[in-house]
Image: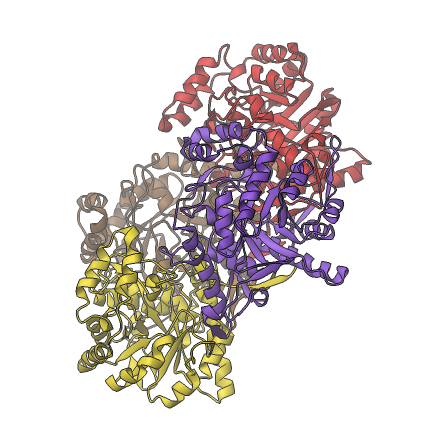
Chain colours: A red, B purple, C yellow, D brown
């Protein structure tokens, strides 16, 4: 719906997860009869959960745990683990920084250069455990580090930034040619964030196996206040799912996976992401709350320590339960922050669906959540 | 109104009680001239109030009190009263549990098995008082316990879950065939929650005498955050009232009663439920606030002690006045939590209506309540 | 705009003062060139302000002050001044009641019978000062007391209730026949509240000189929670102004004055009331804040001490300045609670209008106020 | 979109910056490749920032600093610097006034007469530094003081009031004839606030070089509560940009600059102002937060000390960083209050634009910000 904002400008009305909800149909099911598995390329996962490449969420050790629990842990290859031999004392320091000092000190800590040998070592550690290996680089660093990453061996290569486009224009550096890069790489690539139909369609045309949908929607982000950019997730996922459908037509049947990335704080949000057409979700805050997450009750993303223009904060998210309980329960709380998978199963069962692809077609309603 | 949420998804705009209000017409009446009585099957009630089958609302003793006050108390046959010989110490313990411990301890308390002999004894106690007898089971337990219930003697049989469908599908257990069950049972059945036109229409076709409309809308519920499911009550009741009208056509005149169940915290909400087409309301929070309610100022539903995925909390609702005053006044407060029936009468009188069936046709407005 | 709330119910979208604002035109004026005077029947007033018949706003003394300041003070003839010889100690007691005790004690205080001789004495006191005399009765008491009132001598007779209709139906008492009553009375009558087009049109047909528009919209009211009735004031005033226009056509030119009554807490609200078509405003909260108002910083209406179903609270409104400053400034504050008339003048001047009738045609915008 | 508010009134739906956001396109750029420069008349500026003529934002010294940093500092010629030889002690006193005393004391301080010789001296001081010189008068004082101002030498003349129209009507004084005034003046004039298409079009026809868009939208304003006037900035800027386009047609190509003035608290707001069609922004709050701003952590506008009807408050805005850092970073915070220009560049780059004129055409969405 196009709205006239003023005489010389129109805008489309867009929606957040908080604006929508799913509704039951005429049938119900048993939660245990529901499948929540998904596959991308040759890789099968029991649960549609990717752990976000953020130092507060994924360390080599938690990447292994998440893999063993049926999901995919994506290591940030530009985080503390590839800058420091032993990042544990720095993780501890970050969580103890006083409020006013956090941004500045994190800017210093993350100024340390990335060591290619640590990139290789961290990925080797994950590979040794037998789980699927995934590492993430920003588009800016991909050119410089991808050979190290591929040599170290990854199953899935993630290129992740706040906004990643198929066509980056620069006057000073030769930008990454995504299409050429993906074509030449043997490893399937997941790329994003993209938040609009057009941006996502162009990313799909580069040959990516999956697209991350989002633009700083998480609890740790202040993008809206800082940049004036905002892409509410319900509309963003449904738009990109529309691009997936149209790209399938134009490509003669290539299915690109749509992964919601951002604004997924509760199990209810995960349900809504799938209902909008997502194949899987990339979780930050939701997993940072696990007592065995590396953030130790705190959560931050790369934008929180940008050297010139920080666009996020280190936020206290608390610790709700173990990672296993956060995913599979039993849940000690009733606010949608634990037993994420149990809740997804129950929601699908209650509304009558038996697998994720079907559930993408569930009926939804628009009912803004005003806090009451 | 269908709204485009994104390229591949549309949703209907739905409304909560807080989004609407009733408006006066050109006539006014005296409150004492207004009738608020209703009947279901052979049972007549002075007031359109059913007390919700929740341990914080209905004990055998309060079921009797509510019956004597003109309403219907529905005992939860899967609550403490059928699990323990003497549940009073446990009720006391629950209300004194510290915040962080409540969910977990309630999970333990409600793990105690249900005793069929207690089901029989509790119903017998209510029957002995001479009031109409009603007990509630979840769909999962109905098969196992209904013979005990019927043998003990109930006038109205309530099957209540967060979502109850006419067609439950299970790979592991033979699900309850509602249509067959109701057909064979001599006792009229009230069944729900249902929150959509289609789900309610199918429940009506099973032969139910009444349908409970709702899906965890109450103060004690966190369904929206947990499951992503939300069915705002104004739309839900108006949709199910539409199903009642269409089912009356298709059945050649069978009138199924529509009972709003959830999100009814104040007398204003009760007014709005009837204005949307409800014949009666099932009250939880609103009655839990009575000083003689068994919750003692606290309120919780079955979803608060789910063993794997709690979807509600034990909440402090306070104690506003005696049960009689909560229903009939005089009210010591001005916030719609006491003299519920006096307020309903006055609202109907002020807007010019003289009975509930007429009042279902009152003009309403959409005026979102933003807290100011 | 009719909205489908659910399958069997539609409702109209309505608007509050907080939802709208006035906008400048291409012309500006000097505030001192603006006229804010109005007349009703033979009575002319410098300012379009009636003080609401509430004990916290109008005593005989403040009625005189308001009259001398150019407005009209309406004395509540069912308040403390006609129940007690000396109500001052009771006014003092009410403002010192502890929170939880206020409703109950006020119910007791207002249980004292009304004394006809006090009605006469209070009106005589006001008349002696030379200002226009106005007193208010509820529709329920009008029959019983109007002869006393008329004999005592009033210039304007106000019949005020939360909802007053032209057609009250009662099985037990012979209701007031408004049309006959007004026809036979020599004194012009202002009657309300009415909040809809139809109700107001019928009141206009009774021969009333003015209609009060409102339904418990003030700070002291909890009608929405209690009765589920709500009539947002922007729509209500614009609807009743529409009835005035249509009644003028059907009556061959009789102009009934529209007086906004409720929800007028700031000078901005007064501006908006006029912009929606009001000829004048009846102020409660806004005048209760005067340091010389009888409420002494507290405010309450008749609905706060209803014996069975209180629908309002005694609220602390504070004391902002003297009554004269509240009306004419200078204002010591910047929140729209003082210099009400100065603000009205400035708003009219800034937007280019020079009298109230013109200002009723000003362009308005819909811009919901969400607190930021 | 015209909305029916009530039977006799319609209003247009309008939008604030908080209601909208910009969205990425399919292309991204490097922030350093983006140009944020603009020109008005013969004056070129590196950044589209005018500092608002308010005592808490611009002193002669900060006007020079802002000029040296690439923007334009506009001195309030009716502020403390032209009333007092040494205003520093008064600035210090204002920021230390206790809450309840501030309005009254400021009314006294600003009662001091303006000294023409100080007007001349302050402008001379700025001119001596070599930066572009701009001073502001209210329409009321322009007649009286403009010759002093022009004689002292200004490059840009600013006439600024809450609402300035091309046609002011007064019965007592001969109002400023803007068209004649601008025609006869050699200096280019920037004039406003104007908040509607019609008002702005008429201002453009007076020959103004630029129009200030706004009506008290800032943090220090309470215009909405006081006057009932509100002009949400997204709609206001887009409307005035529409007037610029239409005036260009009617004038055969004269381009009048549109400068958003008010409600610009964060870098995100600046981004949105440009996206709605603004050529530049006039900043108050955003610059008052600089540690070297004269307000010393406090902010107030002329409306805060109006002698009869204050319509704003002295507000504490804190001190976030040096003026240079507020404009160019590095930012120590992540809330959009520092590195305003860095954020603007990054937003433009992320969404694929390379200069301000192009960026005015960016796609926007409507996504009300409800605080979550």
At which x and y percent is residue D98? 21, 46
**Which residue is found at the position 31% from the left and 57% from the top?**
C103
Q: Is residue A195 above or below residue D222?
A: above
Q: Residue furthest front?
A: B128
Q: Is residue A272 left or right of residue D102?
A: right
User: Is residue D127 visible in this depiction of the protein?
Assistant: yes
- Viewer-proximal residue among B122 and B173: B122
At which x and y percent is residue A108? 43, 21
Q: Is residue C347 above or below residue B281?
A: below
Q: Is residue C359 left or right of residue A9?
A: left
Q: Is residue A100 above or below residue D252?
A: above
**How many discs mark residues in the rendered view?**
0
Q: Is residue B328 left or right of residue B115?
A: left
User: Is residue A181 visible in this depiction of the protein?
Assistant: no
Q: Quadrant of residue A208?
A: top right
- Viewer-proximal residue among C126 and D159: C126
- Viewer-proximal residue among A324 and D341: A324
Q: Residue furthest right?
A: A252
Q: Is residue C137 left or right of residue B353?
A: left
Q: Quadrant of the N terminus of chain A?
A: bottom right
At which x and y percent is residue D62? 30, 42
At which x and y percent is residue A151? 67, 12
């Amino acid at each position: 719906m196009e709205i006239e904002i003023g005489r010389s400008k129109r805008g489309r009305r867009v929606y957040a997860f908080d604006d929508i909800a799913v509704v039951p149909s005429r049938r119900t099911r048993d939660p245990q009869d529901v499948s929540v598995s998904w596959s991308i390329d040759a890789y099968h996962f029991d649960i549609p959960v990717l752990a976000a490449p953020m130092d507060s969420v994924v360390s080599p050790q938690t990447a292994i745990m998440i893999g063993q629990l049926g999901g995919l842990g994506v290591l940030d290859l530009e985080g503390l683990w590839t800058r420091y031999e032993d990042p544990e004392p720095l993780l501890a320091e970050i969580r103890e920084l006083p409020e006013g000092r956090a941004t500045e000190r994190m800017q210093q800590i993350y100024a340390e250069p990335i060591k290619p040998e640590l990139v290789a070592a961290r990925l080797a550690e994950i590979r040794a455990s037998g789980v699927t290996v995934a590492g993430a680089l920003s588009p800016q660093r991909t050119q410089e580090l991808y050979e190290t990453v591929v040599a170290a061996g990854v199953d899935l290569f993630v290129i992740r930034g706040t906004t990643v486009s198929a066509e980056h224009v620069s006057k000073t550096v030769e930008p990454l040619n995504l299409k050429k890069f993906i074509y030449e790489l043997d490893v399937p690539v997941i790329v994003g964030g993209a938040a609009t139909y057009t941006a996502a369609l162009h990313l799909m045309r580069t040959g990516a196996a999956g697209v991350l949908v989002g633009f700083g929607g998480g609890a740790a982000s202040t993008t809206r206040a800082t940049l004036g950019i905002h892409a509410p997730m319900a509309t963003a996922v449904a738009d990109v799912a529309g691009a997936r459908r149209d790209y399938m037509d134009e490509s003669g049947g290539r299915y690109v996976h749509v992964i919601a990335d951002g604004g997924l704080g509760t199990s209810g949000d995960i349900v809504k992401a799938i209902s909008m057409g997502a194949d899987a979700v990339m979780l930050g805050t939701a997993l940072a709350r696990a007592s065995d997450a590396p953030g130790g009750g705190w959560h931050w993303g790369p934008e929180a320590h940008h050297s010139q223009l920080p666009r996020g904060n280190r936020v206290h998210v608390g610790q709700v339960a173990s990672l296993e309980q956060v995913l599979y329960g039993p849940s000690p709380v009733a606010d949608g922050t634990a037993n994420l998978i149990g809740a997804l199963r129950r929601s699908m069962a209650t509304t009558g669906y038996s697998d994720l692809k079907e559930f993408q077609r569930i009926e939804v309603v628009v009912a803004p959540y005003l806090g009451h």
